[in-house]
Image (tube, grey):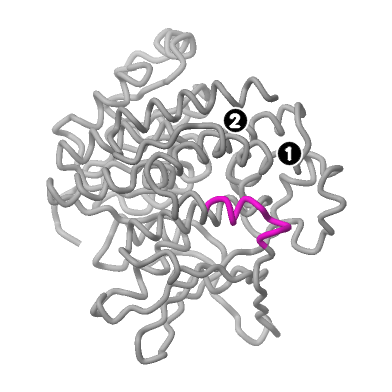
Amino acid sequence: MSSKQRNIAILGSTGSIGRNSLVVLGELPEQFRVTYLTTNVNIDLLEDQISRFHPRGVVVLDEQQAQRLRQRVSNVEVLSGVKGLLEVVRRDDVDIVLNALVGFAGLKPTVEAIQHRKQIALANKETLVVAGAIVTALAKEYNVRILPIDSEHSAIFQCLVGEDRTQLKRIILTASGGPFLNTPIEKFHGITVEEALKHPNWKMGNKITIDSATLMNKGLEVIEAYWLFGIPTENIDVVIHPQSIIHSMVEFIDGSIKAQIGLPDMKIPIQYALTYPERMPLNVPHVNFPKLHAMTFFEPDRTKFRCLQLAYDALSIGGTAPAVMNAANEIAVQAFLERKISFDTIPQLIEQAMAAQANHRTLEIENTIEADIATRKFVRTLV
Protein backbone atom coordinates (compact mmCIF):
# COMPACT_ATOMS: atom_id res chain seq x y z
CA MET A 1 0.00 0.00 0.00
CA SER A 2 1.03 3.57 -0.58
CA SER A 3 2.34 5.29 2.55
CA LYS A 4 -0.19 8.07 1.95
CA GLN A 5 -3.30 7.69 4.08
CA ARG A 6 -6.41 7.63 1.89
CA ASN A 7 -9.67 9.31 2.88
CA ILE A 8 -12.86 7.31 2.57
CA ALA A 9 -16.56 8.16 2.67
CA ILE A 10 -18.89 5.27 3.50
CA LEU A 11 -22.42 5.73 2.17
CA GLY A 12 -24.71 3.52 4.25
CA SER A 13 -22.35 2.99 7.18
CA THR A 14 -25.04 1.59 9.49
CA GLY A 15 -26.07 -1.21 7.13
CA SER A 16 -24.52 -4.67 6.92
CA ILE A 17 -21.84 -3.76 4.35
CA GLY A 18 -21.13 -0.46 6.08
CA ARG A 19 -20.62 -2.13 9.46
CA ASN A 20 -18.34 -4.77 7.97
CA SER A 21 -16.39 -2.05 6.16
CA LEU A 22 -15.74 -0.26 9.43
CA VAL A 23 -14.46 -3.51 10.96
CA VAL A 24 -11.99 -3.77 8.07
CA LEU A 25 -10.99 -0.10 8.29
CA GLY A 26 -10.55 -0.35 12.03
CA GLU A 27 -7.66 -2.75 11.36
CA LEU A 28 -6.04 -0.48 8.75
CA PRO A 29 -5.69 2.91 10.49
CA GLU A 30 -2.38 3.73 8.81
CA GLN A 31 -3.81 3.15 5.33
CA PHE A 32 -7.25 4.78 5.62
CA ARG A 33 -9.02 7.61 7.38
CA VAL A 34 -12.82 7.61 7.58
CA THR A 35 -13.83 11.17 6.71
CA TYR A 36 -17.60 10.78 6.17
CA LEU A 37 -20.33 8.37 7.25
CA THR A 38 -24.00 8.29 6.26
CA THR A 39 -27.22 6.66 7.37
CA ASN A 40 -30.89 6.80 6.54
CA VAL A 41 -32.40 6.98 10.03
CA ASN A 42 -30.20 4.93 12.40
CA ILE A 43 -28.62 7.82 14.32
CA ASP A 44 -27.98 5.70 17.44
CA LEU A 45 -25.53 3.44 15.64
CA LEU A 46 -24.17 6.39 13.67
CA GLU A 47 -23.40 8.18 16.94
CA ASP A 48 -21.42 5.15 18.10
CA GLN A 49 -19.51 5.15 14.81
CA ILE A 50 -18.78 8.87 15.19
CA SER A 51 -17.28 8.31 18.63
CA ARG A 52 -15.04 5.54 17.32
CA PHE A 53 -13.91 6.87 13.93
CA HIS A 54 -14.16 10.65 14.39
CA PRO A 55 -15.27 11.53 10.87
CA ARG A 56 -15.24 15.15 9.72
CA GLY A 57 -18.89 14.94 8.75
CA VAL A 58 -21.94 12.69 8.56
CA VAL A 59 -25.12 12.63 6.50
CA VAL A 60 -28.54 11.58 7.77
CA LEU A 61 -31.03 11.20 4.93
CA ASP A 62 -34.04 11.74 7.19
CA GLU A 63 -34.20 15.45 8.08
CA GLN A 64 -35.91 14.95 11.46
CA GLN A 65 -33.32 12.39 12.54
CA ALA A 66 -30.56 14.68 11.30
CA GLN A 67 -31.88 17.45 13.55
CA ARG A 68 -31.98 15.07 16.52
CA LEU A 69 -28.38 14.08 15.88
CA ARG A 70 -27.29 17.74 15.71
CA GLN A 71 -28.66 18.15 19.23
CA ARG A 72 -26.68 15.12 20.43
CA VAL A 73 -23.26 15.72 18.86
CA SER A 74 -21.23 18.90 18.63
CA ASN A 75 -17.88 17.74 17.30
CA VAL A 76 -18.98 16.73 13.79
CA GLU A 77 -20.74 18.37 10.85
CA VAL A 78 -24.22 16.90 10.29
CA LEU A 79 -25.64 17.21 6.78
CA SER A 80 -28.99 15.85 5.62
CA GLY A 81 -30.87 14.45 2.66
CA VAL A 82 -29.73 13.57 -0.84
CA LYS A 83 -28.19 17.03 -1.06
CA GLY A 84 -25.92 16.09 1.83
CA LEU A 85 -24.90 12.84 0.16
CA LEU A 86 -23.97 14.61 -3.05
CA GLU A 87 -22.08 17.27 -1.12
CA VAL A 88 -19.76 14.86 0.72
CA VAL A 89 -18.81 12.79 -2.34
CA ARG A 90 -17.64 16.01 -4.06
CA ARG A 91 -15.31 17.09 -1.28
CA ASP A 92 -11.54 17.19 -1.63
CA ASP A 93 -11.04 15.21 1.60
CA VAL A 94 -12.53 12.10 -0.03
CA ASP A 95 -10.39 9.77 -2.17
CA ILE A 96 -12.64 6.69 -2.13
CA VAL A 97 -16.42 6.49 -2.03
CA LEU A 98 -17.66 3.17 -0.69
CA ASN A 99 -21.27 2.99 -1.80
CA ALA A 100 -23.23 0.59 0.42
CA LEU A 101 -26.60 2.27 -0.05
CA VAL A 102 -29.60 0.07 -0.78
CA GLY A 103 -31.53 0.37 -4.04
CA PHE A 104 -31.94 3.13 -6.61
CA ALA A 105 -30.81 5.72 -4.03
CA GLY A 106 -27.22 4.71 -4.77
CA LEU A 107 -27.22 5.98 -8.36
CA LYS A 108 -26.91 9.76 -7.98
CA PRO A 109 -24.06 9.67 -5.43
CA THR A 110 -22.12 7.22 -7.63
CA VAL A 111 -22.48 9.46 -10.68
CA GLU A 112 -21.50 12.54 -8.67
CA ALA A 113 -18.47 10.77 -7.20
CA ILE A 114 -17.27 9.61 -10.63
CA GLN A 115 -17.62 13.13 -12.03
CA HIS A 116 -15.37 14.32 -9.18
CA ARG A 117 -12.86 11.56 -9.96
CA LYS A 118 -13.27 9.54 -6.76
CA GLN A 119 -12.40 5.86 -6.77
CA ILE A 120 -15.58 3.80 -6.36
CA ALA A 121 -15.88 0.74 -4.13
CA LEU A 122 -19.32 -0.46 -5.17
CA ALA A 123 -21.67 -2.57 -3.10
CA ASN A 124 -24.79 -0.85 -4.49
CA LYS A 125 -25.49 -3.14 -7.43
CA GLU A 126 -28.57 -1.14 -8.47
CA THR A 127 -26.26 1.63 -9.72
CA LEU A 128 -25.17 -0.61 -12.59
CA VAL A 129 -28.51 -2.39 -12.94
CA VAL A 130 -30.49 0.75 -13.71
CA ALA A 131 -27.82 2.83 -15.47
CA GLY A 132 -24.92 0.55 -16.36
CA ALA A 133 -24.29 2.13 -19.76
CA ILE A 134 -24.20 5.64 -18.29
CA VAL A 135 -22.08 4.79 -15.26
CA THR A 136 -19.47 2.73 -17.12
CA ALA A 137 -19.16 5.40 -19.83
CA LEU A 138 -18.66 8.08 -17.17
CA ALA A 139 -16.07 5.97 -15.37
CA LYS A 140 -14.14 5.64 -18.62
CA GLU A 141 -14.47 9.35 -19.41
CA TYR A 142 -13.20 10.44 -15.97
CA ASN A 143 -10.65 7.61 -15.71
CA VAL A 144 -12.25 6.29 -12.52
CA ARG A 145 -11.92 2.70 -11.39
CA ILE A 146 -15.02 0.90 -10.12
CA LEU A 147 -14.03 -1.93 -7.78
CA PRO A 148 -16.82 -4.40 -6.90
CA ILE A 149 -17.62 -5.34 -3.32
CA ASP A 150 -20.29 -7.97 -4.03
CA SER A 151 -18.66 -11.30 -3.19
CA GLU A 152 -19.54 -12.70 -6.62
CA HIS A 153 -18.18 -9.79 -8.64
CA SER A 154 -15.13 -9.51 -6.43
CA ALA A 155 -14.54 -13.22 -7.14
CA ILE A 156 -14.74 -12.65 -10.89
CA PHE A 157 -12.52 -9.58 -10.64
CA GLN A 158 -9.92 -11.55 -8.68
CA CYS A 159 -10.01 -14.43 -11.16
CA LEU A 160 -9.36 -12.00 -14.02
CA VAL A 161 -6.34 -10.26 -12.47
CA GLY A 162 -3.40 -10.81 -14.82
CA GLU A 163 -5.58 -12.38 -17.52
CA ASP A 164 -6.27 -11.18 -21.05
CA ARG A 165 -9.99 -10.33 -20.97
CA THR A 166 -10.31 -11.08 -24.69
CA GLN A 167 -9.71 -14.74 -23.76
CA LEU A 168 -12.66 -14.82 -21.35
CA LYS A 169 -15.39 -17.16 -22.56
CA ARG A 170 -17.91 -17.37 -19.73
CA ILE A 171 -18.75 -16.02 -16.29
CA ILE A 172 -20.36 -18.40 -13.80
CA LEU A 173 -22.12 -16.66 -10.91
CA THR A 174 -22.79 -18.90 -7.94
CA ALA A 175 -25.93 -18.62 -5.81
CA SER A 176 -26.72 -20.28 -2.50
CA GLY A 177 -30.29 -20.87 -3.64
CA GLY A 178 -31.60 -19.12 -0.55
CA PRO A 179 -33.92 -20.64 2.07
CA PHE A 180 -36.44 -22.02 -0.45
CA LEU A 181 -34.18 -24.00 -2.76
CA ASN A 182 -36.03 -27.22 -1.90
CA THR A 183 -39.44 -25.69 -1.23
CA PRO A 184 -42.09 -26.64 -3.84
CA ILE A 185 -43.45 -23.67 -5.77
CA GLU A 186 -46.95 -24.64 -4.62
CA LYS A 187 -45.95 -23.55 -1.10
CA PHE A 188 -44.55 -20.15 -2.10
CA HIS A 189 -47.88 -18.42 -1.47
CA GLY A 190 -47.73 -19.26 2.24
CA ILE A 191 -44.11 -18.25 2.87
CA THR A 192 -43.85 -15.84 5.80
CA VAL A 193 -41.59 -12.82 6.15
CA GLU A 194 -39.76 -14.55 8.99
CA GLU A 195 -39.06 -17.61 6.84
CA ALA A 196 -37.84 -15.48 3.93
CA LEU A 197 -35.44 -13.57 6.17
CA LYS A 198 -33.64 -16.75 7.31
CA HIS A 199 -30.80 -16.90 4.79
CA PRO A 200 -28.81 -20.13 5.19
CA ASN A 201 -25.31 -18.64 4.76
CA TRP A 202 -25.19 -14.84 4.84
CA LYS A 203 -26.29 -12.20 7.36
CA MET A 204 -27.55 -9.25 5.33
CA GLY A 205 -30.10 -6.45 5.37
CA ASN A 206 -33.79 -7.25 4.90
CA LYS A 207 -34.11 -6.12 1.29
CA ILE A 208 -31.14 -8.07 -0.06
CA THR A 209 -32.16 -11.11 2.01
CA ILE A 210 -35.59 -11.18 0.36
CA ASP A 211 -33.92 -10.66 -3.03
CA SER A 212 -31.76 -13.70 -2.27
CA ALA A 213 -34.87 -15.73 -1.40
CA THR A 214 -36.51 -14.87 -4.75
CA LEU A 215 -33.17 -15.12 -6.63
CA MET A 216 -33.69 -11.55 -7.82
CA ASN A 217 -30.39 -10.75 -6.16
CA LYS A 218 -28.71 -13.11 -8.60
CA GLY A 219 -30.60 -11.53 -11.47
CA LEU A 220 -29.34 -8.10 -10.44
CA GLU A 221 -25.83 -9.57 -10.29
CA VAL A 222 -26.16 -10.89 -13.84
CA ILE A 223 -26.87 -7.35 -15.06
CA GLU A 224 -24.08 -5.93 -12.91
CA ALA A 225 -21.62 -8.50 -14.31
CA TYR A 226 -22.63 -7.58 -17.85
CA TRP A 227 -21.58 -3.97 -17.27
CA LEU A 228 -18.55 -4.62 -15.10
CA PHE A 229 -16.91 -7.21 -17.32
CA GLY A 230 -18.26 -6.50 -20.81
CA ILE A 231 -19.34 -10.02 -21.68
CA PRO A 232 -22.49 -10.96 -23.67
CA THR A 233 -25.59 -11.92 -21.70
CA GLU A 234 -25.61 -15.44 -23.11
CA ASN A 235 -22.13 -15.98 -21.64
CA ILE A 236 -23.21 -15.18 -18.07
CA ASP A 237 -24.48 -18.29 -16.30
CA VAL A 238 -25.88 -18.86 -12.83
CA VAL A 239 -25.33 -22.06 -10.89
CA ILE A 240 -26.79 -22.97 -7.49
CA HIS A 241 -24.05 -23.78 -4.98
CA PRO A 242 -25.65 -24.13 -1.52
CA GLN A 243 -22.40 -24.19 0.44
CA SER A 244 -21.36 -20.67 -0.74
CA ILE A 245 -17.67 -21.63 -0.75
CA ILE A 246 -17.00 -20.92 -4.41
CA HIS A 247 -18.04 -17.30 -4.85
CA SER A 248 -17.96 -17.34 -8.65
CA MET A 249 -15.92 -18.68 -11.56
CA VAL A 250 -14.60 -17.65 -14.96
CA GLU A 251 -14.04 -19.91 -17.94
CA PHE A 252 -11.50 -19.12 -20.65
CA ILE A 253 -11.50 -19.99 -24.35
CA ASP A 254 -9.23 -23.00 -23.73
CA GLY A 255 -11.75 -24.56 -21.32
CA SER A 256 -9.76 -23.70 -18.18
CA ILE A 257 -11.86 -22.48 -15.23
CA LYS A 258 -10.69 -20.33 -12.32
CA ALA A 259 -12.69 -20.06 -9.09
CA GLN A 260 -12.35 -17.81 -6.06
CA ILE A 261 -12.93 -19.75 -2.86
CA GLY A 262 -13.48 -18.69 0.74
CA LEU A 263 -15.90 -18.94 3.64
CA PRO A 264 -18.91 -16.59 3.45
CA ASP A 265 -17.48 -13.38 4.93
CA MET A 266 -18.03 -9.97 3.34
CA LYS A 267 -14.90 -8.53 4.96
CA ILE A 268 -12.78 -10.34 2.34
CA PRO A 269 -14.21 -8.64 -0.78
CA ILE A 270 -14.53 -5.32 1.08
CA GLN A 271 -10.86 -5.28 2.03
CA TYR A 272 -9.75 -6.41 -1.42
CA ALA A 273 -11.66 -3.55 -3.07
CA LEU A 274 -10.04 -1.04 -0.72
CA THR A 275 -6.44 -2.33 -0.86
CA TYR A 276 -6.32 -3.47 -4.53
CA PRO A 277 -3.94 -4.26 -6.17
CA GLU A 278 -2.33 -5.36 -2.91
CA ARG A 279 -3.60 -7.82 -0.32
CA MET A 280 -3.38 -7.24 3.40
CA PRO A 281 -3.64 -9.70 6.30
CA LEU A 282 -7.22 -10.28 7.44
CA ASN A 283 -8.33 -12.16 10.53
CA VAL A 284 -11.12 -14.37 9.17
CA PRO A 285 -11.78 -18.14 9.41
CA HIS A 286 -10.10 -20.21 6.72
CA VAL A 287 -11.54 -22.99 4.59
CA ASN A 288 -10.99 -26.45 6.07
CA PHE A 289 -11.41 -28.61 2.99
CA PRO A 290 -11.63 -32.03 4.73
CA LYS A 291 -14.53 -30.72 6.82
CA LEU A 292 -16.44 -29.58 3.72
CA HIS A 293 -17.05 -33.20 2.63
CA ALA A 294 -18.85 -32.04 -0.52
CA MET A 295 -19.61 -29.05 -2.71
CA THR A 296 -22.76 -29.38 -4.79
CA PHE A 297 -24.08 -27.54 -7.84
CA PHE A 298 -27.52 -27.31 -9.45
CA GLU A 299 -29.18 -25.61 -12.38
CA PRO A 300 -31.46 -22.79 -11.16
CA ASP A 301 -35.16 -23.29 -11.83
CA ARG A 302 -36.17 -20.06 -13.61
CA THR A 303 -39.84 -21.04 -13.57
CA LYS A 304 -39.89 -21.51 -9.82
CA PHE A 305 -37.63 -18.49 -9.26
CA ARG A 306 -39.26 -16.24 -11.84
CA CYS A 307 -37.33 -13.14 -10.75
CA LEU A 308 -34.09 -14.53 -12.15
CA GLN A 309 -35.63 -14.91 -15.60
CA LEU A 310 -37.17 -11.44 -15.40
CA ALA A 311 -33.72 -9.96 -14.81
CA TYR A 312 -32.32 -11.74 -17.87
CA ASP A 313 -35.34 -10.47 -19.83
CA ALA A 314 -34.77 -6.88 -18.69
CA LEU A 315 -31.11 -7.03 -19.68
CA SER A 316 -32.02 -8.39 -23.13
CA ILE A 317 -34.66 -5.68 -23.65
CA GLY A 318 -32.25 -2.94 -22.58
CA GLY A 319 -33.06 0.76 -22.34
CA THR A 320 -34.95 1.58 -19.15
CA ALA A 321 -36.33 -1.97 -18.75
CA PRO A 322 -33.80 -2.82 -16.00
CA ALA A 323 -34.74 0.39 -14.16
CA VAL A 324 -38.43 -0.56 -14.36
CA MET A 325 -37.68 -4.08 -13.14
CA ASN A 326 -35.57 -2.77 -10.26
CA ALA A 327 -38.14 -0.17 -9.13
CA ALA A 328 -40.96 -2.71 -9.27
CA ASN A 329 -38.90 -5.15 -7.24
CA GLU A 330 -38.05 -2.56 -4.57
CA ILE A 331 -41.72 -1.68 -4.06
CA ALA A 332 -42.84 -5.32 -4.17
CA VAL A 333 -40.22 -6.43 -1.65
CA GLN A 334 -41.18 -3.60 0.71
CA ALA A 335 -44.84 -4.55 0.35
CA PHE A 336 -43.99 -8.16 1.23
CA LEU A 337 -41.94 -7.06 4.25
CA GLU A 338 -44.95 -4.99 5.34
CA ARG A 339 -47.14 -8.11 4.89
CA LYS A 340 -49.30 -6.44 2.23
CA ILE A 341 -48.63 -9.11 -0.44
CA SER A 342 -47.64 -12.75 -0.54
CA PHE A 343 -44.14 -13.97 -1.44
CA ASP A 344 -45.23 -15.31 -4.83
CA THR A 345 -46.77 -11.94 -5.74
CA ILE A 346 -43.34 -10.28 -5.96
CA PRO A 347 -42.46 -11.58 -9.47
CA GLN A 348 -46.05 -11.06 -10.62
CA LEU A 349 -45.87 -7.35 -9.82
CA ILE A 350 -42.49 -7.02 -11.52
CA GLU A 351 -43.80 -8.71 -14.65
CA GLN A 352 -46.89 -6.48 -14.70
CA ALA A 353 -44.73 -3.37 -14.39
CA MET A 354 -42.36 -4.47 -17.16
CA ALA A 355 -45.35 -5.04 -19.45
CA ALA A 356 -47.09 -1.78 -18.57
CA GLN A 357 -44.27 0.78 -18.47
CA ALA A 358 -42.94 2.41 -21.65
CA ASN A 359 -39.34 1.58 -22.43
CA HIS A 360 -37.00 4.46 -23.28
CA ARG A 361 -34.43 3.00 -25.65
CA THR A 362 -32.13 6.02 -25.33
CA LEU A 363 -30.77 5.70 -21.83
CA GLU A 364 -30.09 8.96 -20.00
CA ILE A 365 -30.13 9.74 -16.30
CA GLU A 366 -33.37 11.70 -16.74
CA ASN A 367 -35.08 8.78 -18.50
CA THR A 368 -33.88 6.40 -15.81
CA ILE A 369 -35.22 8.60 -13.02
CA GLU A 370 -38.54 9.06 -14.83
CA ALA A 371 -38.88 5.29 -15.34
CA ASP A 372 -38.09 4.68 -11.67
CA ILE A 373 -40.67 7.20 -10.42
CA ALA A 374 -43.41 6.06 -12.83
CA THR A 375 -42.86 2.40 -12.00
CA ARG A 376 -42.99 2.95 -8.25
CA LYS A 377 -46.23 4.88 -8.64
CA PHE A 378 -47.71 2.13 -10.83
CA VAL A 379 -46.76 -0.76 -8.52
CA ARG A 380 -48.05 1.06 -5.44
CA THR A 381 -51.49 1.13 -7.07
CA LEU A 382 -51.35 -2.67 -7.23
CA VAL A 383 -50.43 -3.36 -3.61
Residue 298 in the figure: left or right of residue 168: right
Q: How many marks?
A: 2
* Residue 98 x/y as whole percent: 34, 43
- Which residue is depicted at the point 47% across and 59% down? 222
- Image position of 303 with respect to 335: above or below: below
Badge 2 is on which residue?
A: 331
Q: Amino acid at mark 2?
A: Ile
* Residue 152 x/y as whole percent: 47, 63
Residue 286 in the figure: left or right of residue 303: left
- Which residue is depicted at the point 68% across and 51% down? 213
Nearest to N terminus: mark 2 or mark 1 = 2
Query: What span is in magenta?
Result: 302-311
Disc on res. 6: none
Of helix, strand and loop, which one carries label 1? helix
Mark 1 nearby-residue class (10 Å; few <14, some 14–19, many ≥20) = some
Badge 1 is on which residue?
A: 345
Image quarter of the N terminus? bottom left
- Which residue is depicted at the point 37% across and 43% down? 319
**On the image, which quarter does residue 345 sit in?**
top right
**How far apart, in angstroms, are the residues tagged by discs 2 and 1?**
12 Å
- Image position of 83 with respect to 67: above or below: below
Q: Amino acid at mark 1?
A: Thr
Residue 213 in the figure: left or right of residue 1: right
Q: Nearer the viewer, mark 2 or mark 1?
A: 1
Q: Examine the structure image and report whether residue 310 is included in the region drawn in magenta.
A: yes
**On the image, which quarter does residue 84 sit in?**
top left
Q: Examine the structure image and report whether residue 95 is included in the region drawn in magenta.
A: no
The answer to whether marks 2 and 1 mark residues whose Cβ atoms lie closer than 8 Å is: no
